[in-house]
Amino acid sequence: MIFSIVGVLITAIILLPELLLVLLPPRHKPDIPGKPKDVCTLCENTGRVLCIVTPALSGLRFVAANINFWFWLMAASIALYYCLWIRYVFGDMRFVLLYKPCLGLPAPMGVFACASFLFLGMWSGARTITVSALLYALGRLENDRNLYLQCQKAEKEQAQAENAASAQP
C-alpha cells in the first residue's frame, strides 16, 4: 500500500461538509428516545474509518485510474451531497433536514455520502475501498432511516400536542 494524496483529497472533499455539524449544529432537534442499533453503529463507524484510511493507502490505484463512468458517478454523488448540505444550511439547520427524503430517496445525505465512496472504489478499482463503502453504507443507511422515522414520529406528536393545546379554550 502506497500513500495517495489523490485519495486523501477526494476523501476530504467528500467529508468536508460534515464539519458543518461542528460549526453549525442542528437546530430544532426533536427529543428522540431510541438509540441506534449497536451493530449498525459498529458497521457505520468501522466503514467510515476504513473509507478514510483505504483511499489514502491506495496510491497506485489512482495513478492508473482514468476519467470514466465511475468517476462521473462519484462526482455527481459528491455534487448532490453538497446540494443537500446547502439545503440544510439554508433550511435553518433543522435537524430533520439531515435525514429528510429528497429525489425519492430516504436519508439522501447518507445515500450520497456512501455512494461517493462506493463510486470512488469502483473508479479506482480498489476493492478495499468498495468493501469499506459497503460496510459504511450498511450501518449508516439503517441508522439514518431510523433517525428519520423517529423525527417524523416526534414531529407528529408535537403537532398533535399543539393542536390539542390550541383546541382548549
Image (spheres, grey):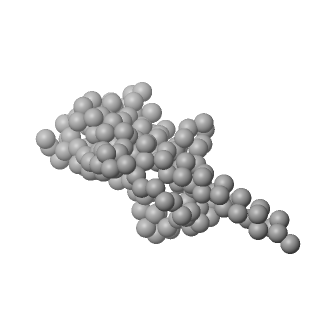
Comparing 137 with 113, the one in front is 137
Comparing 21 with 74, the one in front is 21
Q: From the viewer's perspective, is 139 left or right of 27?
A: left
Q: Which quarter of the rendered picture does the N terminus lie within? A: top left
The extreme bottom residue here reads 169
Tell me which residue sits at (40%, 45%) in the image.
140
| Residue 85 appears anywhere in the view | yes
The extreme left residue here reads 1
Please, is residue 72 above or below residue 39 in the view?
A: above
Tell me which residue sits at (51%, 60%) in the image.
32
Residue 56 x, y percent position in the rendering: 23, 47
Q: Could you tell me how many numbered marks the image carries?
A: 0
Residue 150 x, y percent position in the rendering: 54, 52
Q: From the viewer's perspective, is 50 left or right of 11?
A: left
Q: Which quarter of the rendered picture does the C terminus lie within? A: bottom right
Tell me which residue sits at (70%, 63%) in the image.
161
